[in-house]
Image (cartoon, rainbow, N blue to C red):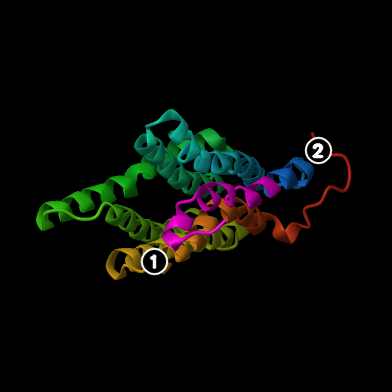
Amino acid sequence: MGFETFDAFYHSDLQSVYLLQVLPALFLAYWWAVAQPVRQSDTPALRFVRLYTLVFCIETMIDPFATGPLVEVLGGGGTALGLLFVLLGDLRVFVLVFGVCAPGRGIGGALREALPWTPVVAVSAYAVHAGIGWIAGGVPGHLLWMIHEIFFVLLAAFFRNYLIPRRIDAADPNRARLERVMSFVMLYYGLWAGSDALILWGGFDAGWLLRVIPNQLYYSVWIPFVYATFFSEREDRVSGPSSP
């Protein structure tokens, strides 16, 4: 299967749907076989992360299908579905942070604190994009995505450098874990923004190839990375009957 441009490859179902399923599918099989049992030695935060990785692994796998082939089958609704999954992608970051910061509240408590943060970047990016369009008399729609990406880098930096240190004591290993996760978020959003700058202002087709990297980080690597960050040092293996 050949592609005349990197743009064509990027927008193909091969890149935007099927290649994004491989690692999450492998992780889902691993989770079911190894990570599923809740161990008595787990802290509330680690029990939360176990459930979180299952729920958002499934969400991550649904996203490319819902915003790609499903839209084509339905013949519309792509903008609404795209916005929904953009917000879900942002929500998953906040749910993880607030769920680990206060795991005793459970998923409901994490959602209640995460939901008000979820539209902040999207709404701010839309407002700035609209303002630039009003001043300049029209701007590329793709610029909206780059603004969103830059704003999320800034918000992730705020979480890493200010909010998380205020919520979790330095002696708690979960603080360093969350800071590492937020650095990962800054990485993929920063790579997206850099790719979009090459596309928008340089007209470089290679920008679409570079965009494949943050796509993989966002869709494929996110959940395995989160799980490994919290459990890699624990030799997380099934060694006997699971705890009730």
* Mark 1 / mark 2, whichever is N-terminal: 1
Which of the 4 quarters of the picture holds residue 181? bottom right
Identify whether 243 is placed above or below 147: above
Front-lying residue, 83 or 161: 83
State if disc 2 and disc 1 touch (CB < 8 Å): no
In the rendered image, residue 192 lying in the magenta stretch gets the answer no
Residue 238, position as x, y percentages in the image: 84, 47
Foreground label between 1 and 2: 1
Magenta span: chief secondary structure: helix
Residue 158, position as x, y percentages in the image: 39, 59
Q: How many numbered marks does the figure carry?
A: 2
Secondary structure beneath label 2: loop
Residue range in magenta is 1-26
The residue that disc 2 covers is: 243
Say left or right for 21 vs 196: right
Amino acid on which the number 1 mark rests in the picture:
Asp
Amino acid on which the number 2 mark rests in the picture:
Ser
The residue that disc 1 covers is: 205
Residue 146, position as x, y percentages in the image: 33, 58
In the rendered image, residue 11 lying in the magenta stretch gets the answer yes
Residue 240 in view in this figure: yes
Mark 2 burial class by Cα count in 10 Å: few <14, some 14-19, many 20+: few
Give the residue drawn at x 47%, y 41%. Answer: 68
Which of the 4 quarters of the picture holds residue 76? top left
Say left or right for 42 vs 80: right
Identify whether 118 is placed above or below 70: below
Front-lying residue, 112 or 199: 199
Identify whether 155 is placed above or below 18: below
Residue 161 in view in this figure: no
Front-lying residue, 39 or 150: 150
